[in-house]
Image (cartoon, grey):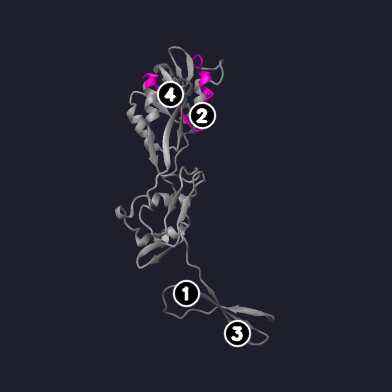
Amino acid sequence: MFRGGRAPLAKPSPPGTQGPAPSTREIYFDLDNSTSFENTKPKKPPTMPKSKRAKVVHLSKTEKKGKELTYKLFANIRECLDKYQYCYVFSVENMRNTYLKEVRTEFTDSRLFFGKTKVMAKALGASPEDEYQPALSQLSKYLTGNVGLFFTSQSPTTTISYFSAYTKTDFARAGIPASRTFTVPAGTVHSRGGEIAQEEDVPLAHSLEQNVRKMGMPTSLVKGRVMLDQPYSVCKEGDVLNSHQTALLKLFGVATAEFKIQMTAYWSAATHEVTEVDAMEE
């Protein structure tokens, strides 16, 4: 028995109906006002529990091999110290892995290491007390910067003369100083940017006009030709290049970076002496 308020009255479903009702319906009767109210609540669909077996597995995830590679580099360097007659310290300008592979292919009977300088110095020995061979601690002081170790049994004259003549020209990368000044002349922009005669060159494709404009060139498209109202200086000698400048240099085929390996000093297993290459050349 209710004394006021709302009392829910269940509404029976009609006989003969089949299938689940789309929602739960309830009717409330107000005893005071003798009025009824209908409340419709949406019925939530049943959900399956989450499977504990469904786990995301990243195929690109690999285990770190930092210490393993460090120990391997350390062991390989000491093994080469026992095998080869000469150990060189070299520095690299404008590092390119492609050209470094060419050097490895040329010297198949030698070994070249380009790893962490602290690990290489530790393998040689940083002091006379922990050096692996006599006088190797004098060579480890050259292991600073972008340097590596080169092991060979060929004579120093042959090795030094080869690397003195080995140079490769490539496109510059951002963050290095420009080795020359490059300016695109006014008028119709050609594919080489004025590096060769216009009779031997072809106009720059009109589809590239929007790209070079995004890189900073104040170009315009006139009758299907890329035009410059005045000469545009892409870079000046000595200035540090940014990504837009290097992209324009590559677009116009201007290679300004020179890959070069400079031999700094070497250690001889026969004499246990360290010789500076610059002093030897003088």
Per the image, label 3 sits on a secondary structure element best described as strand
On the image, numbered disc 1 is attached to which residue?
22
Return the residue nearer the eye: 50 or 183.
183
* Residue toward you, 181 or 154: 181
* Mark 4 lies on residue: 76
State yes or no: residue 141 in magenta: yes
- Tell me the residue that label 2 is attached to: 117
Gap between marks 1 and 2, in whole Å? 73 Å
Q: Amino acid at mark 1?
A: Pro
Residue 136 visible within the image: yes
Q: Amino acid at mark 2?
A: Thr
Q: Is residue 64 above or below residue 226?
A: above
- Circle 3 sits on which residue? 36
Q: Residue at x 52, y 73 (%)?
A: 42
Q: Could you tell me the amino acid type at mark 3? A: Ser
What number is the disc on residue 168? Answer: none
Q: Earlier in the sequence, mark 1 or mark 3?
A: 1
Q: Position of residue 244 (x, y in %)?
A: 47, 52
Where does the image place residue 166, in percent across and percent down from the top left? 37, 32
The residue lying at 50 percent from left, 74 percent from top is 23
| 257 left or right of 2 in image | left
Question: From which residue to which does the magenta span run?
Answer: 132-157
Q: Position of residue 201 (x, y in %)?
A: 32, 54
Viewer-side label of 2, 3? 2
Q: Amino acid at mark 4?
A: Asn
On whether residue 151 falls in the magenta region, the answer is: yes
Q: Of callouts 2 and 4, which one flags the residue occurring earlier in the amino acid sequence? A: 4
